[in-house]
Structures are given as structure tokens and as C-alpha cells.
Image (spheres, rainbow, N blue to C red):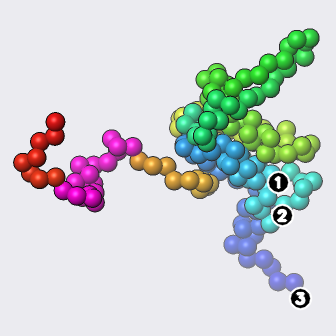
Amino acid sequence: MNRPISTYKRVQQWAVFGRLWFLFDAKWQNPFDSAEKIAKYLAGKHKPIYHPLSDVGDHVVVINTKDIALPNKEWRYRMYYHHTGFAGGSSWTSAWELHNKDQTKVLWKAVYKACGGSLLRHNMMERLHLFPDDKIPQELMENISDHMKQLRPVPKALHEYTEEEIKNFPKVFEWPEDYVLN
């Protein structure tokens, strides 16, 4: 007895097979932890139809790559190797120098490494869209259907608090009204 599939179920199935577009905000995020999460979506590992030999991944749009946060002293000590292919053409570049040249390159290299050595890596990297700030072209903005949760919360800067929030903030002790700071 074959019953027809409901319209809702049919749409749900097409959503699994279709390529969705996800938005990820990299502000204050560790690029290496973020890269593992982004690579998971690029490969399609979050879908029930995932198979290592199938190219079923989604598009990921990453904004604010200029505001990534490397742990401890990694800006200075993490080095990237590059070779031009000519004799004596090898060079090492620190993370902060690479970030100053191209503000998307550190995260791009982290995602490239997190995608593994599969032959599908090139196709996955084509579905990665990196932007140094939050300005996304309109044609990409129309495609975005969902967002990925950040791995760690972004703290508020002091100038982002209102006067009321500052006034109501719990204090360890109160200064006397007539006390003057020198």
C-alpha cells in the first residue's frame, strides 16, 4: 500500500538535498575552532544524507574575519610556510603579517586544513565566502537562509553600555558622596 507523500514532507526532503546558505560571524572567535565547525557544514556532515564520497555540503558566508581572536601569543608565533616553486623561494610568514596583508587569509587557511585531504576539498572551498567586515553583496545576502551559532560569546565594549546599565551594575562597595579621588 503506497500512500502519497505529503507536501510538507516533500519540501522537507528537498531541503535536505538542496544547498543551503549559512551565515557565521567570526568576531572574537578562534579561527581554528571555527574552522572545524565551518568545514563540517561545507562537507555536509550536519545532514542525514552525508557520505564521505558525496558532495552534499552547503555554502557558508563568514563575516568579520578581521576581528578573529587567536589565543595567547599565537599572532606572533604561528608561522605559515610558502614556496614560490623557484630555487630559494621558500618563506615563512607570521600570522599577524599574513592578517595585515589579507584579513581573510588566516581563517581561509584554517578552514582549508580542517577540510582534510579529500579530493572534494577544492569544491568545498569554493562554497566558502569570506568577508573582512559585515558588508555582504546583495546577491549573496538574498541566498542566506540560516545562521551558525558562534562558539564563544562576544563581550560588549564599554561604550556599548547605556548609562542606566552602568548605574545599576552591582558594586563591591559604595564610595561616600563627599569622597574626592586624587
Which of the numbered marks, if any, corresponds to residue 79? none
Residue receiving disc 1 = 56
Calculate the distance from the C-alpha at mark 1 to the C-alpha at mark 2. 8 Å
* Magenta residue check for 7: no
Which tag is nearer the camera, tag 2 or tag 3? 2
Residue receiving disc 3 = 1
Residue receiving disc 2 = 49
**Circle nearer the N terminus (2, 3):** 3
Mark 1: secondary structure? loop
As drawn, is 132 to the left or to the right of 48?
left
Mark 2: secondary structure? loop
Q: Position of residue 47 (x, y in %)?
A: 77, 62
Calculate the distance from the C-alpha at mark 1 to the C-alpha at mark 3. 32 Å
Q: Which residues are magenta?
A: 157-174
**Circle nearer the N terminus (1, 3):** 3
The correct choice, above or below, for 176 with respect to 14 in the image is above
Q: Is the residue marked by circle 2 packed among few (<14), some (14-19), or many (20+) residues within 10 Å?
A: few
Cβ atoms under marks 1 and 2 closer than 8 Å? yes
For badge 1, the amino acid type reads: Val
* Magenta residue check for 163: yes
- Asked whether residue 181 appears in the rendered view, the answer is yes
Q: Position of residue 77 (x, y in %)?
A: 68, 31
